[in-house]
Image (spheres, coloured by chain):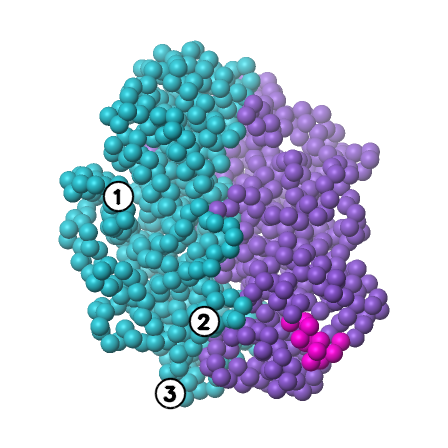
Amino acid sequence: MMAAQDFNFLLATDSYKITHYKQYPPNVSKVYSYFECRRKKGAHFNEVVFFGLQYLLKKYLAGRVVTEEKIQEAKVFYQMHFKQAVFDEEGWRKVLEKYDGRLPIRIKAVPEGKIIPRGNVLFTVENTDPDFYWLTNYIETMLVQMWYPITVATISREFKKILAKHLKATSGSLEGLDIKLHDFGYRGVSSQESAALGGAAHLVNFCSTDTVAGLLMVQRYYGCPMAGFSIPAAEHSTIISWGKSREKDAFECLLDQFPSGPVAVVSDSYDIFKACKHIWGDKLKERVMERSEDSALIIRPDSGDPAQTLIEVIKILEECFGCSLNSIGYKVLPSYLRIIQGDGIDLNSINEILEKLSDEGWSAENVFFGCGSALLQKINRDTLNCAFKCSYVETNGKGMDVYKQPVTDPSKGSKRGRLSLRRNSDGFIETVERGAGKPEEDMLVTVFENGTILQEYTLDEIRKAAQLWEDDMSPSQHNKEDATTLEIHQKHIMNGVH
Amino acid sequence: MEQHIGTTDFNILLATDSYKVTHYKQYPPNTSKVYSYFECREKKTDPTKLRKVKYDKTVFYGLQYILHRYLKGQVVTREKIQEAKEVYREHFQDDVFNEKGWNYILEKYNGHLPIEIKAVPEGSVIPRGNVLFTVESTDPECYWLTNWVETILVQIWYPITVATNSREQKKILAKYLKETSGSLEGLEYKLHDFGYRGVSSQETAGIGASAHLVNFKGTDTVAGIGVIKKYYGTKDPVPGFSVPAAEHSTITAWGKDHEKDAFEHIIKQFPSVPVSIVSDSYDIYNACEKIWGEDLRSLIEMRSADAPLVVRPDSGNPLDTVLKVLEILGKKFSPTENSKGYKVLPPYIRVIQGDGVDINTLQEIVEGMKKHRWSIENIAFGSGGALLQKLTRDLLNCSFKCSYVVTNGLGVNVFKDPVADPNKRSKKGRLSLHRKPNGDFVTLEEGKGDLEEYGQDLLHTVFRNGKIVQNYTFDEEWRRFMCAYTAREDFALLDRRTERRKYRQRNIHSLIDVAKLPPLLYNT
C-alpha cells in the first residue's frame, strides 16, 4: 500500500529535528530508539493495549515517501522557517537515489492487540543503512503519536473491565458486554483524522459506535468490513422542533418511524422526570409495552448528576412499568424498556453509577452507556507516559548503550542498549536490555523494513488478543507487581487539567 | 488559494454521528427549514472547584478550514451515495439511509450543499454566551441537512479553544514582561509550540498549531504552517519560525562522559543563530554550573545577542528548576539590572522551559521569577500537550443547538431547557450579534435583530449553497486579535497613548493600519 500522495513526509517532524543530523557524534552509523509507556509511581493503569501502528505504516511510512518535489518544497520551506539554510537536502536526496524514496528503517513491534504491562518496550526503530543514522529520530514525532490509539484502546478496555465486573455480578453472564459502551465522541475530538483513529481504537473492545469515521478506518487499514453498529436515535433538535407542548407527539413519531429494532429517545429537553412519568409511563405507555424485546425503547437522560438522575429515572420506570427479578435476584425492567446514559460518563462516574444501581438491587442489564470526550479526547500523552528514546548507537564501528537519567526526575530515566521483549519463567512479560535478549524469545516482530510492511494484523486478530482475562471480571487484580487496588485505578483519568 | 474539493476520499455522507442518518424521519411533518447556531456557552453556576482562569472571551477561529476542506464545492457524487448506502445498511442492519434526500442534492445542486452559514469574522474575540455562527437549510427539501453537518462543524471547538487558551497565556506573559522589563519586545516568541508529537493525529497538529500562531510566532509544529498557507493565506513567507535545538538523543549519543563534547560540538555547529540545548540528560545543575558555567564559558561569551545559547531544563518541578538554573547561571554569568530594577542575564545566554508548562504553571513561574527579581526577558517557554491536546469541548462549553424551525409555513422558536441543568438552556429563534453603544456584545434572539435598533448584524454570510463567499487571510486574524487585545480592559498594560502606538508599530509584523479599521467592531 502506498503512503498518502500529497503528504510531505519531510515536513512531518518537529522543526528542531531538521538540525539534528549535525549534532550527532561524527562517524555515527546507527541510531536505535524505542517506544514505551513508562511506568510511573501511583499510575492508574498498569497495562496497555498496543494498537495503531499499522495505520501509520500504511498511511505515512510505506512505499515511496520521498520525491524530488518534496525535497524542494521542504528546502524552500525550512529556509524561511529557520531564516537560514539548515535543511539536509543531500541526506534526503540519498534516500531518493539509493532507495527510490523508500525509508531505510526497521521497525520491530509487539503484535497489535497485545496487552503489555507498563514499562516495557513496545516497538523499536533503527536505520538499516549507516548513511541514514539521522532518520531514526526524524520519524519520532510521527511515531510518538501512537500514544493516542494506544491510550484510547487502553481506556476503552478499562471501561470494559468495569462493565464486565458489574454485568457478571448482577446478571450472571457477560451477554451484551460488547455493546454496553457506545462511542459518542465524533464531535468532541480535535479533527476528522483523530475521530477515525480514536473511533477505531474503541472498536478493539466494543462494537457499538456512532463515530462512523472509525468504521471506515478499520475497514481500510485493519481489514474489517463492518466493525461496529448503531441504532436509530433522537437528538434534541428532532424533539424540540415539535415545540414545547408537543413533546409527546415527537416521542410518538419516533415509535412510529422505527417500529422494529431498538430506538433511543433523548427525554430531558424540558423535564426528564415528567417525560418518563407522564409521557412514556402514561400517555404512550401502551405503545411502549407493545414493542418486542428486539425493539426496545431506550430512554436517554442527558443532564443533571448522572448517577442520581439514572436512579430516579429507573425508579419512575419501575413504578410505571414494573420489573422482574433475574436468575440471581437483581431487578430488570421489562424487556421492551432500557436506559442509555450518555452524558458525563467517564471511568469514575460509570463505576459510581453501576455501584449505585447494584446497591439499589438493579442489574447492569438495564443500562447502556454513551461516552464522548472521556473516551476520545480527555486523554494525553501523559496519561500513559508514552515516550520514545534513543537507547543504542554505533560510532566508529563500536556499539554503545546510551540513556538519559535526569537527576531531577528518576521516572524519566530511559532503557539502555538493544531491547527485546519476552515472557519470563514466571509467565510475566519483561523487557531485556543491553542486547542480552535471546532472539528466539523475542516477542517483538519486524513489521516494517526499507519501505515494506512485513506483517499485518486484522481487527479480528486484534480483538482476540485484547480480550478481557478472567481476572479482569472480578475485583481481585492480576498484576502482582504492585499493591494498588482496582478502586485506586478508577480515580481520575487526567492529571493537571485547568 | 487552491480550488480542490476537499480530500478526495472524504465522504461527507459518512462524516456524521450515526444517529443523524435517522433524523430526517424524526422532524415534524412539513418542516421546511431547520436553523441552528453555535456558541461557547456561559457557565453561570460554577461547581465548587474554582477555575483559576476564567476564559470569559473566546477567539473565533477555524471555520474557514472546515469550509474549504470539507464543505465547499461538489461534495456529493453518485459513488459517495452508493458507498454510504452500503455502509449504513451493514451498520444499522437496516435500510434507514436517506438515499432520496442525497440524490436530490446531487441532481438539483450538482452535489453542492444547500445550506447557509453566517459567522462572526475569524479572529474576533467575543464574550461567552454569544452566537458565533448560524446554519440553516436553503431548500425546503433539505431541512434535515442543517443538523447533519453539526458533527463536522462542532469540531471547531478545537481551534477556538487552542487559540483562546494560547491568547490567555499571552496575556499572562505580556503582563509580567511589561512589569519586569518595561516593554513587550519579543512577546510573540515567548511561548513556543512543542506539541506535534503529543496530539492525537497529523490533522489535529495542523489545526492546533495554526490556532497557536494566531497569537505567537514560534513553533516546531511544522504542520500548522501548512494549514495557514493552504486555507488562510498570509503576506509573510511563513507565519511561524524556529531555531536549531538539541534533543536528548543528540546529547546521549555521545555517551555519559561526553556531555561536554556534545554541548561543544552543537554550539559550534550553530555559531550565528540562537541555539537551544537540552541540559538535563544527567544533571541539569551540574551542566549549568560546570559545563556551561566553566568548561565552555568562553565559547558562550563570544556569542552575539542575536545568537544566544538557550539552556533548556526538561525535568523536575518547573518553577524550582527554573529558579535554580537562573541562580546558577546568574553566579557564572553576571546579570545586569534593567530599567525596572530586574536582573537580566547577559544577552548571549537565555533559558527555555519546555516541560510541564500549562497556563497554571506558566503563571506560577513568571510570578516566581518576578518575586526573585528576574526579568521575563531571560526566559521563553515551550508547551506541548497543554497547548494542543489537554483541552476538551467542555472547557469553553462549545455547543450547537437548533433554535428555529419552519413547519407548515410557520416559523417556530424552539429551545431546550432541561430541568436539572439551567446551564444547558439554549437560545430561541433567529439570532444575530450586535455591539451596543457602550461596546458590549449582545446576542439578540427571536429575530429581534431585524428591528435594526442595534445596528448591523456582526454575523456575515461566509458559505452559501456550496460556495465560500467570504475569506479571511491570516493577517486579518492578527489584526483582529491585536484590536481585541487593545480593548479597554487589556489596556491596563499599555498606559499611554504613545506606548500604544509604538507597540502597534513594533509588533504587527506587517501591514496593518489599526486606525483604518471599521469603527463598528473596534473602538480603541
Front-lying residue, B522 or A336: B522
Closer to the chain start, of discs 1 and 3, is 3
Image point 46% across, 13% down: which residue? B290
> In the picture, residue A125 is in which quadrant?
top right
Q: Is mark 1 on a helix, strand or loop?
A: helix
Q: Relative to A34, is B250 above or below?
A: above
- The residue pinned by badge 3 equals B409
Chain to which mark 3 belongs: B
Magenta span includes B442: no
Closer to the chain start, of discs 2 and 3, is 2
Q: What element carries label 2?
A: helix
Number of residues whose C-alpha sits closer than 10 Å to that of mark 2, classed few (under 14), some (14–19) or many (20 or more): many
Q: What element carries label 3?
A: loop
Number of residues whose C-alpha sits closer than 10 Å to that of mark 1, classed few (under 14), some (14–19) or many (20 or more): few
User: Please, what is the three-letter code of the amino acid marked with disc 3?
Assistant: Gly
Boundaries of the magenta span:
A313-323
Specify the label residue B492 is tagged with.
1
Mark whose residue sits in front, 2 or 1: 1
Chain letter matching colour purple: A
Cα distance between the residues tagged 2 and 3: 20 Å
x and y, in percent, of residue B490 in the image: 28, 46
CB of mark 1 within 8 Å of CB of mark 3? no
Specify the label residue B454 is tagged with.
none
> In the picture, residue B72 is in which quadrant?
bottom left
x and y, in percent, of residue B331 in the image: 39, 15
**In this structure image, what is the colour of chain B?**
cyan
Closer to the chain start, of discs 2 and 1, is 2
